[in-house]
């Protein structure tokens, strides 16, 4: 999945609504993001969260997942994402990789957990 598609899929999971606005001629369109708790649209001051690079943002998404009972599946996907070439864990070091996962690795694991990950 490309980074924009990942961010949009996670944002939708977190309650953001995505719409496309077209110009008067119907030729140009742009995406707008709305979140009910933010009282409006995204803007330069309030953009869509950068889940792939911001550990705080992805942690908020993880909390929503955990509230919905997806923690055990997430943990499995996170370990799989952090292991090179899908190797089986053979030491505590492999588990530490998951603990120190990047925001991008956590985002991939979350998307796999909710069934939104698409291989390209």
Image (cartoon, rainbow, N blue to C red):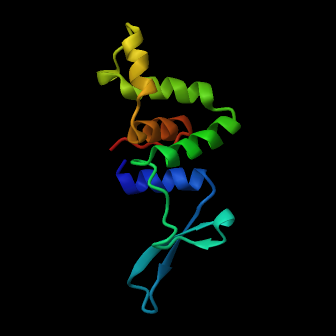
On the image, the x and y values in percent for residue 87 come to 34, 16
Up the image or down, 4 lies above or below 54; here it is below
Residue 27 or residue 38, whichever sits in front: 38
Q: Is residue 90 left or right of residue 70?
A: left
Count of numbered labels shown in the rendering: 0
96 sits left or right of 46 in the view = left
Question: Which residue is rendered at x = 53% and y = 39% of the image?
Answer: 115
- For the view shown, which residue lies furthest in the bottom direction? 24
Specify the quadrant that holds the C terminus. Answer: top left
Residue at image point 46% right, 43% down:
55
Residue 41, given in percent of the width and then of the height, sits at: 57, 73
Q: Would you identify the image quadrant in which residue 88 lies?
A: top left
Q: Is residue 101 above or below residue 27?
A: above
Residue found farthest to the top: 90
Q: Left of 111 or right of it: where is 35?
A: right
Q: Position of residue 114 (x, y in %)?
A: 56, 39
Residues 20 and 78: in front is 78
Residue extending furthest toward the left: 85
On the picture, is 39 further left or further right than 82? right
Q: Position of residue 105 (x, y in %)?
A: 40, 36
Residue positioned 47% across, 35% down in the render: 109
Relative to 81, say whether 63 is above or below.
below
């Amino acid at each position: 999945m490309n980074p924009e598609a990942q961010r949009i899929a996670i944002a939708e999971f977190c309650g953001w609504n995505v719409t496309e606005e077209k110009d008067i001629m119907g030729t140009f369109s742009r995406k707008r993001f709305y979140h009910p708790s933010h009282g409006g649209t995204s803007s330069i001051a309030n953009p869509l969260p950068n889940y792939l690079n911001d550990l705080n943002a992805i942690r908020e998404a993880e909390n929503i997942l955990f509230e919905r009972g997806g923690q055990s599946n997430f943990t499995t996907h996170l370990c799989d994402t952090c292991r090179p070439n899908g190797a089986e864990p053979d030491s505590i070091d492999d588990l530490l990789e998951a603990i120190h996962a990047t925001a991008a690795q956590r985002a991939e694991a979350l998307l796999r957990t909710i069934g939104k990950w698409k291989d390209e």
